[in-house]
């Protein structure tokens, strides 16, 4: 017999079953069995948590693989599409990533993610002031660099790397920065 299952060994007061109070018949849980159940539940919990963690890591790995594939050079506009001081909304590297292309000088184009680095609200350009404004919590970024100027945002906007070729503006990469 499993010693953990022997009632004489498992009643908290150590007395045999015949000497136990009547109420204990209504609560016939053995201490050993109770601890065994708790250990088993804890092990089950640990295994399931580890499994969920592994699944999460695999999912993140797949996502970054697909993202890298999406991030291929792509034409986003013609140089002639924008006058100085104008901006254009486009999506890069995927259709879920809104970005802003801006012409800040005759030969200068810059592009940044259009999602505020605070809580992802869309920013709107004010190129006359060299600023991007986030209306959600009054955040401001410098339009020429994407760096935060005021309000809650602390990180700069991700920069879209551009290449100009034969009058076409091509997005080639995304630079995520911390400062
Ligand atoms: S979301 Fe832009 S400032 Fe809060």
Image (cartoon, rainbow, N blue to C red):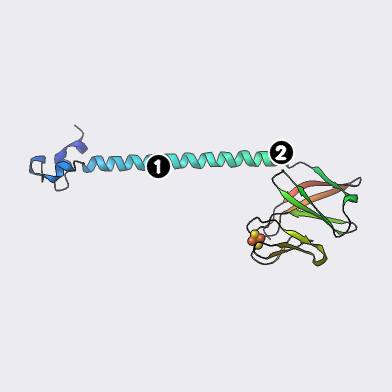
Of the numbered discs in the image, which one, if any, rests on residue 119?
A: none
Q: Is residue 106 left or right of residue 19?
A: right
The reply to whether residue 154 is in sight is no
Q: What residue is drawn where x is 27% and y is 43%?
A: 35
Provide the residue designation for mark 1. Answer: 45
* x and y percentages locating residue 53 in the rendered image: 50, 42
In the rendered image, the vertical position of residue 40 relative to residue 87, given as above or below:
above
Q: What residue is drawn where x is 72% and y is 58%?
A: 123
Q: CA distance from mark 2 to mark 1?
A: 36 Å
Q: How many marks?
A: 2
Q: Quick one: SS at disc 1?
A: helix
Q: What residue is drawn where x is 75% and y is 51%?
A: 99
Q: Is residue 15 left or right of residue 172?
A: left
Q: Residues within 10 Å of mark 1 (few under 14, many from 20)?
A: few
* x and y percentages locating residue 54 in the rendered image: 51, 40
Q: Residues within 10 Å of mark 2 (few under 14, many from 20)?
A: few
* x and y percentages locating residue 122 in the rendered image: 70, 56
Q: Quadrant of ligand 1?
A: bottom right
Q: Residue furthest top?
A: 1
- Residue 130 in which image quadrant: bottom right
Marks 2 and 1, the one that precedes in the sequence: 1
* x and y percentages locating residue 161 in the rendered image: 78, 50
The reply to whether residue 127 is in sight is yes
Q: Quadrant of the N terminus?
A: top left
Q: Quick one: SS at disc 2?
A: helix
Q: Is residue 33 left or right of residue 141?
A: left
Q: Quadrant of the C terminus?
A: bottom right
Q: Is residue 124 left or right of residue 153?
A: right
Question: Is the CB atom of the residue marked by disc 1 within 8 angstroms of ligand 1's nearest atom?
Answer: no
**Viewer-proximal residue among 87 and 59:** 87
Q: What residue is drawn where x is 15% and y is 44%?
A: 24
Provide the residue designation for mark 2. Answer: 69
């Amino acid at each position: 017999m499993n010693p953990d299952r022997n009632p004489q060994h498992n009643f908290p007061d150590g007395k045999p079953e015949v000497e136990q109070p009547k109420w204990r018949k209504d609560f016939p849980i053995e201490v050993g069995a109770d601890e065994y159940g708790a250990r088993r539940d804890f092990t089950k919990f640990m295994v399931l948590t580890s499994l969920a963690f592994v699944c999460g890591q695999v999912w993140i790995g797949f996502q970054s693989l697909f993202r890298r594939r999406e991030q291929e050079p792509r034409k986003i506009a013609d140089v002639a599409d924008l006058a100085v001081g104008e901006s254009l909304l486009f999506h890069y590297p995927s259709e879920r990533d809104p970005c802003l292309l801006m012409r800040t000088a005759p030969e200068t184009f810059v592009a940044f993610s259009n999602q505020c680095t605070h809580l992802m609200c869309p920013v709107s350009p004010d190129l006359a002031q060299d600023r991007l404004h986030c209306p959600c919590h009054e955040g401001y970024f410098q339009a020429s660099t994407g760096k935060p100027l005021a309000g809650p945002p602390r990180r700069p906007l991700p920069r879209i790397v551009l290449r100009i070729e034969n009058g076409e503006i091509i997005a080639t990469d995304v630079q995520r920065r911390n400062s």
